[in-house]
Amino acid sequence: MNRFLAGFVPILIGFPTVLPVWLISYFVLNQPFVLSVAISLAGGTLAYWLSSVYFSSRFLKKHELTRKEYQYIKKNLSEAKPKIWRVQKALISVRHISSFKQRKDMIKMIRKIYSLTKKEPKRFYQAEQFYYSHLDSATELAEKYVFLSQQPRKNKELELSLTETRKTLKELTKTIEKDLYKVIADDIDHLNFELDVAKQSIKTKKESQVIDESRRLK
């Protein structure tokens, strides 16, 4: 179960609990109306809390994280989100055609790292350098480039700064690409393993067919 469902399902459990608890309290147990309402609200809250604890525990167990670790990762993701929005906004607004693909690739990789980490929080530990350093650098450089490029008059020094910033952004794109590969490294290893198993299975099957064919010919 993903984090969205882990947070949404308790609402589906807690809210509908209120009415049956009120009906039982008021009509079956003959409690006063106001007290029945209070009991039903308490029952719904309790059902919501218990289901939240249960599904949250399942989520953390699935991703092999402690509650403290998840809160730490969640905090970092929360801080990263506005930075990603800022760098995306800055890179899109840059009017430099020859660097368009490089900027587009950077945005895609940044968003991919974030979405993978949000979906599977444990991947954060493979992307720590991205969140602690490279994302900040990308944000600062992109916004600096936009600011400089929007100046009405450009002298030689300003053009040189723009060129250097573009060059650094290009190098940073390669760095972020490495960050992405770190995040998906285990998936690549798993895929290679599955490919090796599949190839070995195909090879064994072919060898078996050759042996069977040889026996028929004899």
Image (tube, rainbow, N blue to C red):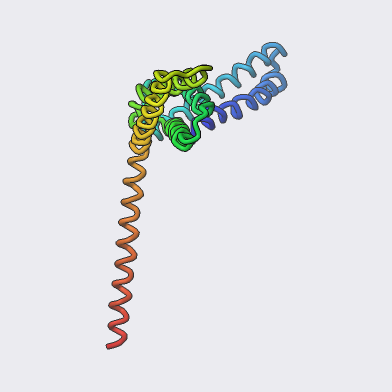
* Residue 43, image x, y percentages: 60, 20
* Residue 57, image x, y percentages: 43, 28
Asked whether residue 119 appears in the rendered view, the answer is no
> Residue 158 falls in which quadrant of the image?
top left
Q: Is residue 134 left or right of residue 16?
A: left
Residue that appears at 39% across and 33% down: 63
Q: Is residue 197 left or right of residue 52?
A: left
Residue that appears at 41% across and 20% down: 156
Q: Residue furthest bottom?
A: 218
> Depth check: 206 or 70 in front?
206
> Depth check: 218 or 88 in front?
88
> Depth check: 198 or 28 in front?
198
| Rendered-image quadrant of the C terminus | bottom left
Residue that appears at 34% across and 65% down: 202
Asked whether residue 157 appears in the rendered view, the answer is yes
> Depth check: 164 or 30 in front?
164
Residue 27 against residue 103 in the figure, above or below: above
* Residue 49, image x, y percentages: 53, 21
> Residue 195 falls in which quadrant of the image?
bottom left
* Residue 121, image x, y percentages: 41, 30
Q: Residue furthest front?
A: 156
How many numbered marks does the figure carry?
Answer: 0
